[in-house]
Amino acid sequence: MSWFGSAARYPRYRSRKGTEETIQQRVNECIARSLAGRALPEAGREMRDIVAYLDSLGTLPRSAAVDTVRLVGNLATGKRVYAASCARCHGADGSGSLTPAVWGAKSYSIGAGLARQTVLATFVRWNMPYDHKDTLSHQQAADVAAYVLSRPRQDHPGKEKDWPKGDPPADVAYATDSARKAGKPMPAARPVLRRRVAPAPKPDNSSPR
């Protein structure tokens, strides 16, 4: 999940939106979904600084791709692996401390990429535990992901409009209008918590500074 060369790949088409997306829009997706925060004004100073930083990474080589973990996870096993390998940093209740929360009121939203089974399992397999990378098997990573994703996390308003062309990934965490209209199987409902902040920027904070 390297950022190297990311800015040079935009604008680009993204199926989740069904349209071409700018680097500013992609940054705001990360803020609103992965951080469950409020998107930044696209012309604001903070956004300009973030894009400038991403631009500075443009000439660095991207890391080699890793194998995607596509195994079905087992909740009971995942709970045990989480307790043994993850809880010491992320907390028994998933709330984190010096590390990010992985579920609960302060975690990423259900609309985040990491709320997908294959994405989280792959991330865990190749990056976690942070100080003991490459110690979990593919199956253990899938089990941990299944357990973590069974826990409640913040909602993402408007998520039902994602993948407007009816092509959501098989492991998407929520139902979409287009998939329902196409008669596709709906994913199992997951527990969601009330959103703490609105995803969109405040109207009075939209002008450049």
Image (cartoon, grey):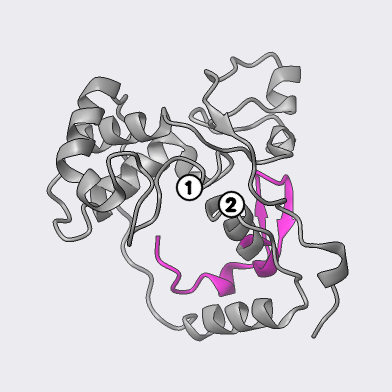
Residue assigned mark 2: 36
- Horizontal side, residue 40 vs residue 191: left or right: right
On-image quarter of the C terminus: bottom right
User: Is the Cβ of the residue at disc 1 closer than 8 Å to that at disc 2?
Assistant: yes
Disc 2 packing (10 Å; few <14; some 14–19; many ≥20): many
Report the residue at 17% width, 44% height from top. 85
Q: Residue at x 29, y 23 (%)?
A: 75
- Return the residue nearer the eye: 97 or 107: 97
Name the spot of residue 189 as percent of width and height, x first: 55, 20
Please name the residue shown 76% across and 19% down the image: 181
Question: Can residue 74 be seen at all in this image of the molecule?
Answer: no
Q: Label 2 sits on what residue type? A: Ala
* Label number found at residue 107: 1
Q: x and y percent of residue 66 in the render?
A: 30, 52
**Residue 59 lies in quadrant:** bottom left
Question: In the rendered view, would you say 15 is above or below 34?
Answer: above
User: What residue lies at 45% left-to-right and 69% top-to-bottom?
Assistant: 3
Establish if 193 lies above or below 64: above
In the rendered image, which quarter contains the N terminus?
bottom left
Q: Which residues are magenta?
A: 1-26
**Visible in this render: residue 48?**
yes
Q: Nearer the viewer, residue 38 or 160?
A: 38
105 left or right of 42 in image: left
Q: Residue 28: name its quadrant.
A: bottom right
Q: CA distance from mark 1 to mark 2?
A: 7 Å
* Sequence order check, earlier mark of 1 and 2: 2
Mark 1 packing: few (<14 Cα in 10 Å), some, or many (20+)? many
Q: Secondary structure at mark 1?
A: loop
